[in-house]
Image (cartoon, rainbow, N blue to C red):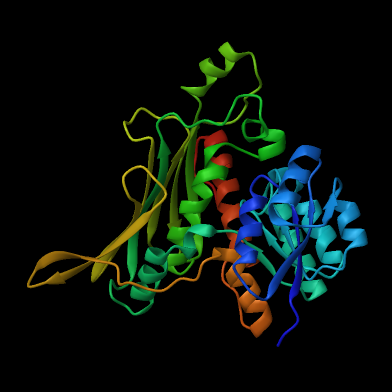
Amino acid sequence: MQKKLRVGVIGLGMGRGHIRGYRAHAGADVVAIADPDAKRLAATGEEFGIAGRYASAAEMLKRERLDVVSVATPNKFHAPLTLAALARGAHVLCEKPMAMNAGEAGKMLAAARRARRRIMINFSYRFTAPAQALKQAVDAGTIGPVYFGRTMWHRSRGMPGFGGWFGQKALAGGGPLIDLGVHRLDLALWLMGYPRPSWVMGGVYDRIARPLAKASGKKFDVEDLATGYIRFANGATLALEASWAVNRPEAEKMETRLYGEKGGLVHRNRGEGYEFEGEVYTVRENRVVASPAPTVSVPGGGAMFHFVEAIQRGRPHIADGVDGVMVMRLLDAIYRSAAKGAPVRP
């Protein structure tokens, strides 16, 4: 029997989900957690029975011998904490977005390669059963080469609380584009096989959030809606939309559609919640027919389970740092294009 991987989790907001994911795998043991919020640190430690509790991530990395570290902090700290964990010999699973910008992301990937350690990004929507089934269909050639896609995540009024880190560019790097859009962008790119981008056009808006934030008297300096249009070297194009506040009736609407030469597909949330479904479109007798995505078995624990399994079995893992860097390049390009008012090269 293989020795259990010793895991540490930094940041106990999103990090609590990471703990649950690791606990789903018999080969992982979360032995240490770190968070500067003393109450949250104590409560999480008690909830999961974790003895190693640290107010400082640096102290945790210094004192604990860890095989894997999850970085689940505000975006500003992703790069420095990842670099510190890699320097201590740990593999890293980092929350999305990978970093504040592509420059930081590139340094993280380079450091992982130098250290001969893995880096994975928590692109969690890849790990839904419908997404896995759709990927199998695409890879089998069912819909043929993809030439156009549209991927989006809209909330009607789902802004994070004004004054928090999500709405501050210095801590988050951006608004819904870098918070929500990153998931739907990665999902579309993954299904498309991550084609090489040629140019990007983008737009960002704060028409709804700006007056609300001003009335609250709290800081909010990111967008509430972002759009992007990406052209790839193979001629395919992809439209991206992400919002925390837009005038449509659904509280949450997530959808990724791809169109290929032989068919199409969709991955979307059911109703307005966080359960998902997929459909594959094929042509029969000159009619387009929709079929539910095939049923596939996906183990509980999502990205964390997958990461542990890949490490223990010596297999490649998906959602690696190469994909993370490409996503950051595209997000950066959307913001640059919006500021410039013209297309840019990513």
Please state if 200 lies on the left or on the right of 145 as rendered.
right
Along the viewing direction, whichever of 318 and 127 lies nearer the viewer: 127
Residue at 37% x, 56% y is 276
Please state if 292 lies on the left or on the right of 299 as rendered.
left
- For residue 257, say whether it is visible: no
Residue at 65% x, 18% y is 218
- Outermost residue to the bottom: 1
Image spot of residue 196 (x, y percent): 50, 65
- Please tell me whether residue 203 is drawn above or below residue 110 in the rendered image: above
Residue at 70% x, 55% y is 48
- For residue 221, say whether it is visible: yes
Image spot of residue 2 (x, y percent): 72, 85
How many labels were placed on the picture? Answer: 0
Please state if 5 lies on the left or on the right of 276 as rendered.
right
Q: Which of the 4 quarters of the picture holds residue 132?
A: bottom left
Along the viewing direction, whichever of 137 and 204 lies nearer the viewer: 137
Q: Quadrant of the N terminus?
A: bottom right
Q: Which of the 4 quarters of the picture holds residue 110?
A: bottom right
Image spot of residue 345 (x, y percent): 55, 52
- Please tell me whether residue 265 is drawn above or below residue 284 in the rendered image: above
Image spot of residue 73 (x, y percent): 71, 47
- Please tell me whether residue 134 is drawn above or below residue 83 in the rendered image: below
Residue at 37% x, 73% y is 296
